[in-house]
């Protein structure tokens, strides 16, 4: 129903409140799929396991996909492998956070 790129575009509205960049450009969203019945699945991580906004960020990702037309169910899977690091971020994020 929706491509990975379309799902990533919707998720890019979610901003990491700690650093001010969206989750997609930070490289925290690993994959996103949607079947013909409107069931979406997002695989993501967080920059640290100790993130105090853990549950809120997962909820924001879910809500960003739920806003898309004809989406019936959204599952957000949080994974810790591969572990996130700054090299996974877009160049503008690396530059701003000193990882370039």
Image (spheres, rainbow, N blue to C red):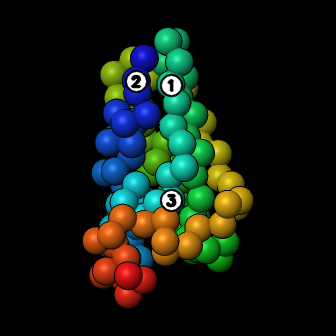
Question: Can you identify the residue that label 1 sits on?
Answer: 34
Q: Is residue 69 above or below residue 19?
A: above
Tell me which numbered mark, 2 or 3, is placed earlier along the sequence: 2
First-in-chain label (1 vs 2): 2
- Point out residue 73 in the picture as x, y percentages from the top left corner: 54, 26
Q: For mark 3, what is the residue?
A: 28
Q: Quadrant of residue 9?
A: top left
**Separation of marks 1 and 2 at Cα, in angstroms:** 6 Å
Residue under the image location 59 percent in, 67 percent down: 84
Q: CB of mark 1 within 8 Å of CB of mark 2? A: yes
Examine the rendered structure and indicate whether residue 42 appears above or below residue 20: above
- On the image, the x and y values in percent for residue 60 come to 44, 51
Residue at the image position 68 percent from the left and 55 percent from the top: 79
Foreground residue among 85 and 11:
85
The relative height of residue 87 versus residue 78 in the rendered view (above or below) is below
Q: Is residue 64 visible?
A: no
Helix, strand or loop at disc 3?
Answer: loop
**Cα distance in 3D space between marks 1 and 3:** 18 Å
Comes first in the chain, label 1 or label 3: 3
Q: In this figure, which residue is indicated by the disc labeled 2?
A: 2
Residue 51 falls left or right of residue 49: left
Mark 1 neighbour class, 10 Å CA radius: few under 14, some 14 to 19, many 20 or more? many
Which residue is at a point 49% across and 65% down the rendered structure image? 88
In the structure shown, which secondary structural element does the residue marked by tag 2 occupy? loop
Residue situated in front as seen by the camera: 51 or 97: 97
Name the residue: 59% across, 45% down.
43
Quarter of the image for the N terminus: give it.
top left
């Amino acid at each position: 129903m929706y491509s990975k790129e379309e799902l990533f575009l919707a998720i890019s509205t979610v901003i990491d409140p700690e650093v001010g960049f969206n989750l997609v450009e930070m490289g925290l969203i690993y994959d996103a799929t949607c079947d013909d019945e409107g069931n979406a699945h997002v695989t993501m991580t967080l920059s640290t396991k100790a993130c105090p906004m853990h549950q809120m960020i997962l909820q924001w990702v879910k809500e960003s996909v739920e806003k898309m037309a004809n989406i019936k169910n959204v599952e957000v899977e949080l994974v810790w492998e591969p572990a996130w690091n700054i090299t996974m971020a877009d160049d503008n994020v690396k530059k701003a956070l000193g990882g370039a």
